[in-house]
Amino acid sequence: DQTFSDVEDYTVIITPAVQDTFLVPEEYGTIQAAIDAATPGAQVLVNSGTYHEDIVIDKPLVLKSNFGPSKLTFIRNKSKS
């Protein structure tokens, strides 16, 4: 029988999982297309520009501007009803 005193000490290092990154517009033409393709916990990285679209985020993810919020503009797509 093994007792608690017989067990060696171990150090456990836990690192966060590597996030998948989905690039707009390099890999996906729209932000919504990248969101739809993204896995939960992924990062959607949006390059500078103006994006005319409505977006729906239905999973946990990071939506981030590549060069900060001052270089990114969202304009709601008013053509949808």
Image: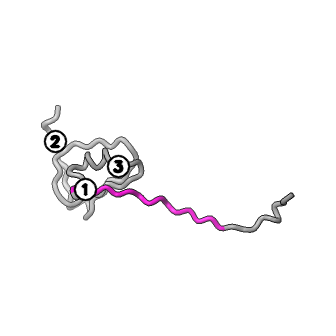
Mark sitting earlier along the chain (2/3):
3
**In this view, which residue lies farthest toward the left?**
79
Q: Return the residue at label 1.
A: 27
Q: Quadrant of residue 22?
A: bottom left
Q: Is residue 3 left or right of residue 26?
A: right
Checking the image for residue 38, the label placed there is: 3
* 1 within the magenta span: no
Q: Secondary structure at mark 3?
A: loop
Categorize mark 1 by other alpha carbons within 10 Å: few (<14), some (14-19), many (20+): few
Q: Disc 1 marks which amino acid?
A: Glu
Q: Secondary structure at mark 1?
A: loop
* 19 within the magenta span: yes
Identify the residue shown where x is 56% and y is 62%.
Answer: 14
Q: Secondary structure at mark 2?
A: loop
Categorize mark 3 by other alpha carbons within 10 Å: few (<14), some (14-19), many (20+): some
Q: Disc 3 marks which amino acid?
A: Ala
Mark sitting earlier along the chain (1/3):
1
Q: Disc 2 marks which amino acid?
A: Asn
Identify the residue shown where x is 31% and y is 44%.
Answer: 36
Identify the residue shown where x is 84% and y is 60%.
Answer: 3
Tags 1 and 2 touching, CB below 8 Å? no
Q: CA distance from mark 1 to mark 2?
A: 21 Å
Mark sitting earlier along the chain (1/2):
1
Q: CA distance from mark 1 to mark 3?
A: 12 Å
Q: Which residues are magenta?
A: 11-25
Q: CA distance from mark 2 to mark 3?
A: 22 Å
* Residue 57, x across and y down, in percent: 33, 43
Quarter holding the C terminus is top left
Q: Return the residue at label 2.
A: 77
